[in-house]
Amino acid sequence: MRLDHLTLHAPDLSAQRAFYALTLGLTVCHDTPEEFTVQVGRSRLSFRRGHTPAAHFAVDIPRTLVTQAQAWLEARVPLLADPAGQVRFGPDGAFHSSNLYFRDPAGHIAEFIARHDLPFDHAGPFGPQHALHLSEFGLVVPDVAGAVDWLEARLGLRAWVGRSRTFTPVGGADGSLIVVPRGRGWFPIGLPGQPVPFHLTYRQDQERHLSPADLPFLHPQVPA
């Protein structure tokens, strides 16, 4: 599963645009009064004007540049810490990844993730060109098991690092939906996850589109 284009909402597009284009240095490739898009490596990330709960998404970075990425981010944005004060996580767990988290002006929880089992080896210094692609989007649902069963049966998206009632990634190492139940805290700050409006263009065997309107288990859950 390859995540090509994710659209989320933000109440203050000016602040959101300044953050992604100026603070993070990503290239704006589409811009209107109601929406803008930045290039994130081979992927695109868009924001439309609108109020929304906080979403979670991740961007792959080279496994060779984690320390440089941490310093680069810390010079631009506060990193999110767990209750013990730690701001850099891994490599451990099923993903064998190193992880850095921060929030944008809309409150979305963004993650830079370096997957140590994938050969993304780049020389430094770290910069916006090392944001390689979108690789995760958090899908908050009322029932994880039912949603995962539906995604597998209808879309062919399978769990790939195990299944649980509170956290099940579907897709693959190069792109995943992180399926979690409503109210589960997003790591590392424990912010309760809520369903959000979104539009995702992804590629599996062909280009496909996904939004809450396509997911019957989300119809009464997603804010307008």
Image (cartoon, rainbow, N blue to C red):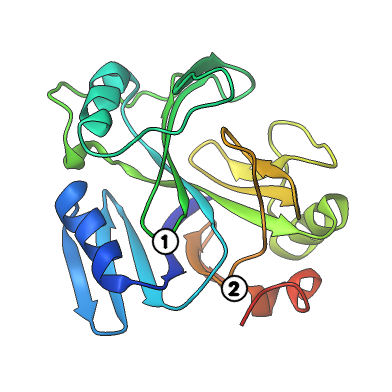
Residue occupying the point 64% across, 39% down: 190
Mark 2, secondary structure of its residue:
loop
* Residue carrying label 1: 106
Residue 119: give x, y in percent of width and height.
36, 23
The total of numbered circles placed on residues is: 2
Residue occupying the point 57% across, 32% down: 188
Q: In this view, does 18 lie above or below 13?
A: above
Q: Quadrant of residue 53?
A: bottom right
- The circle drawn on residue 211 is 2
The amino acid type of the residue labelled 1 equals: Ala
Residue 123: give x, y in percent of width and height.
16, 21
The amino acid type of the residue labelled 2 equals: Ser
Q: Is residue 31 above or below residue 93?
A: below
Observer-nearest residue: 58 or 169? 58
Residue 100: give x, y in percent of width and height.
42, 30
Q: In which quarter of the image is residue 219?
A: bottom right
Residue 105: give x, y in percent of width and height.
36, 57
Residue occupying the point 31% across, 78% down: 35
Q: Is residue 223 above or below residue 60?
A: below
Mark 1, secondary structure of its residue:
loop
Sooner in the amino-acid sequence: mark 2 or mark 1: 1
- The circle drawn on residue 123 is none
**Is 55 displayed left or right of 215 in the figure?**
left
Q: Is residue 102 above or below residue 150?
A: above
For the residues marked 2 and 1, what is the alpha-carbon distance in whole angstroms? Answer: 20 Å
Residue 14 appears in view: yes
For the C terminus, the image quarter is bottom right
**Is 144 displayed left or right of 168 in the figure?**
right
